[in-house]
Amino acid sequence: MTVLAWCVAFLLDSLLGDPPGLPHPVRWIGALITFTQRAIRKTCHSDLALRIGGGVMWLVVVGVSWCVAWSVLALAEHIHPWFGWCVEVGMIYTTLATRCLADMARDVATALRQGSLKESREKLAHIVGRDTSQLQPAQITRAVVETVAENTVDGVIAPLFFLLLGGAPLAIAYKAVNTLDSMVGYKHEKYRAIGMVSARLDDVANFIPARLSWLLLSAAAWLSRQDAPAALRIGFRDRRNHSSPNCAWPEATVAGALGVRLGGPNDYFGERVDKPWIGDARRAIALEDIPRTIRLMWLASLLALGLFALTHYALAGA
């Protein structure tokens, strides 16, 4: 029943995505982060105090997320096993973001295709942390490809990995780790101290999933008739071309598969950040690279689901 729950949840995410107005644990986690951060900033003022407070915030948010998920699931299973199974499916569904990520990427591509530069910048701003106000079409396309590649790890592979390790409660806890990083894990002056623990522990959580993405996205490149050998080669060659120890793995693999160059300098919170380039510019990036990257994401996600399902059966039979 466990793997069936995974598959049903994956199917629900593929069909429904994240409908507006639907209750979602990430929104509640975000509200808890906001509340906790405000309380810490009121009492902690030095860098050291903010770092300690940031560590406490991480423990509170991740701990509460896991405990609530475990308690709700245990209560549902106590009421009836089938009700518990349905709640488990719902929890897993909320940890996956494949359809949502694909839809947001397509929205940017559609605006670009229609020639609406302003709209494409606005839609891109919903899915990236960089300044989009001055980006040109090629830069917007590159940002979408990078985001889809990177979030293939955060939005699908990593949640499924932690689902394998500890079920739905641990997958929810991972979403708390990831949400903390996305809200406070920046090197900008405002977040550098309070977000240090969140950023470092997000790196730890994504260490294995990011490296799995190298293999899964390379296999997806082969299945979609992209350049799989280049995906493997450049994915490994440029794995360190990023300030994050994890982000370059999926980005470099996708860059190799498509034959384009990603990365480079960007503006974050008004500050210029010089990033190294990733991949080889065998050709200029094109609008069609967005649907190609979305296809790679879907295939890699299905491969991850199959891999972890087989691993579960192998461990269960051992």
Image (tube, rainbow, N blue to C red):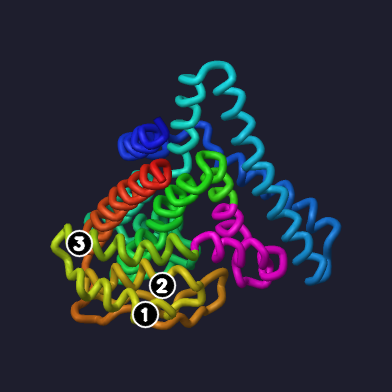
The answer to which of 81 and 73 lies nearer the viewer is 81
The residue positioned 58% from the left and 59% from the top of the image is 181
Q: Which residue range is magenta in the image?
A: 177-206
Residue 299 position within the rendered picture, expressed as x and y whole percent measured from the top left: 25, 53
Q: Amino acid at mark 3?
A: Glu
Disc 1 designates what residue?
A: 238
Q: CA distance from mark 2 to mark 3?
A: 22 Å
* Figure quadrant of the N terminus: top left
Q: CA distance from mark 3 to mark 1?
A: 23 Å
As drawn, is 300 to the left or to the right of 188? left
Kindly report which numbered mark, 3 or 1, lies closer to the viewer in this rendering: 1
As drawn, is 43 to the left or to the right of 314? right
Can you name the residue that lies furthest to the top here?
Answer: 79
Residues tagged 1 and 2 counted as in contact (Cβ below 8 A): yes
The residue positioned 67% from the left and 70% from the top of the image is 192
Which circle's residue, 2 or 3, is located before the other in the chain? 2
Residue 224 makes an appearance in the image: yes
Overall secondary structure of the magenta section? helix
